[in-house]
Image (cartoon, rainbow, N blue to C red):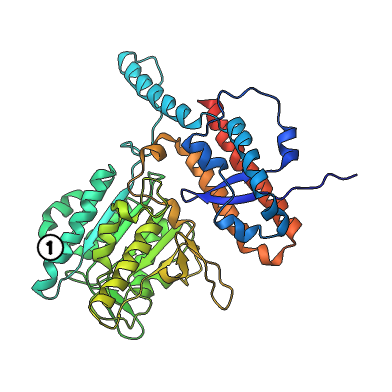
Amino acid sequence: MARRRVPLVTRYQCGRITPSFAGISFLNSLPQQETATSDTTPTARKLLGAAVGHARADCNNAFMKLNFAISFVLLVVLVAFVSGTSAIAAQEASAQLVSSSGTAQQSETQQPAETTSNSAENRATVIVVVGAAAVDKYAEPFAAWADRWQAAAAKANAEFVRIDSTNAETATQEVSLPAGAETTHRDLLQQAIVQHASGSTEPLWIVLIGHGTYDGQLAKFNLVGPDVSPGELSTWLNDVSRPLAFINCASASSPFLNELSGDNRVIVTATRSGHELNYARFGDFMSAAITDPAADLDKDDQVSLLEAYLTASKRVEEFYQTESRLATEHALMDDNGDKLGTPAAWFRGVHATRRAEDGAALDGTRAHQLHLVKSERELSLPEEFRAERDEIELAIAALREQKSSMTEMEYYDQLEVLMLKLARLYQTLDAAQ
């Protein structure tokens, strides 16, 4: 008689997809091993916690609801086996890394410590461009927003390049221009992108602060000197081989999303249309949210690009409501390359709950994986581990998009494979450390 498959329940904990219950048959198939403790660590709870929240939407049949209490008890057992002391192991690994680094300085024959994501060799890069203010009353707030991004980059130990009227000389020194090249802000931006297109697996962040224009056919970001169009930026970004976070805080910025959307890119614009031409306040709230603990919606001690986008969009909405004004800006975000974007109003927490009428895929998963300022827990994880974990999460998100076209058994079969792969990844991390 064929073994009856118990569906795998999934959940979101701390913004991460984690396996939570693989069924009695999976427990019985595990090799026998004593567990050091039945207590769950933060990482273990993140890996194999209670089946709540988003999982109930996927597992709404009566059987799972009636046996929810039983599954929770089994979770405790499975948690202790698979991840037991993963958080403690991560801390010990971090201490060992510091120790090995100090030993390497004493002996040239020993191997150097493994490079981490915030090392000088593999850091994020933040390029902030402050455009033409047009009138003096905008110059001060634009500069203040850029200052916030500079402070965030410093906190993240990221490379930082700032291009504006107040530091043109400094920007020219930081960006090496070809012989005979002009020193316009447009040229500085192009060369900054070229110089930071590769050489790191950490994201390249590009933030445009200022005004934009749109004549019904072509949008532009207003620089000091010649302006820049979406098509020109698209050409400059062709050779970028690292993850890209592009944030255009200007008015009439939506056409940049349509042009720049692509694989391994997160594009955020302050407007949903090129015809939203009024002064945009999104950049103010976005620059504040990127390091604001209140923007940490999933409480994992770090603010993702998605969380900053959702928080900034909400604060923009509240501003117009408080001032009793008609909203003239509606931000969009695209992270799946379909050039459509998803408004913040379609999210509940960090999960999109609404879908376009044409069934277009929703955004958010990739944007929630990008953090400018990472938590200590995130930094303690090896770079290779984080990369593989992110790939599995993206695969799970893609599978969920296909759920409506699959049978229940097909869906849970494939989901179980991915969830067990994620669980074994954490188990491998524990074993390696």
Whether residue 226 is visible here, answered yes or no, is: yes
Counting from the top left corner in percent of width and height, residue 160 is at 24, 49
In this view of the protein, which residue sits in the foreground, 117 or 309? Answer: 309
Counting from the top left corner in percent of width and height, residue 209 is at 24, 65
Does residue 37 appear left or right of residue 59 in this picture? left
Does residue 257 appear left or right of residue 293 in this picture? right
Counting from the top left corner in percent of width and height, residue 34 is at 63, 22
Q: Residue furthest bottom?
A: 216
Q: Residues within 10 Å of mark 1 (few under 14, many from 20)?
A: some
In this view of the protein, which residue sits in the foreground, 297 or 357? Answer: 297
Dot 1 falls on a residue whose secondary structure is: helix
Circle 1 residue? 165
User: Disc 1 residue type?
Assistant: Ser
Q: Residue at x 57, y 51 (%)?
A: 11
Q: Residue at x 26, y 73 (%)?
A: 319
**Considering only vertical position in the picture, is 229 above or below 173?**
below
Does residue 54 appear left or right of residue 344 in this picture? right
**Considering only vertical position in the picture, is 225 above or below 366?**
below
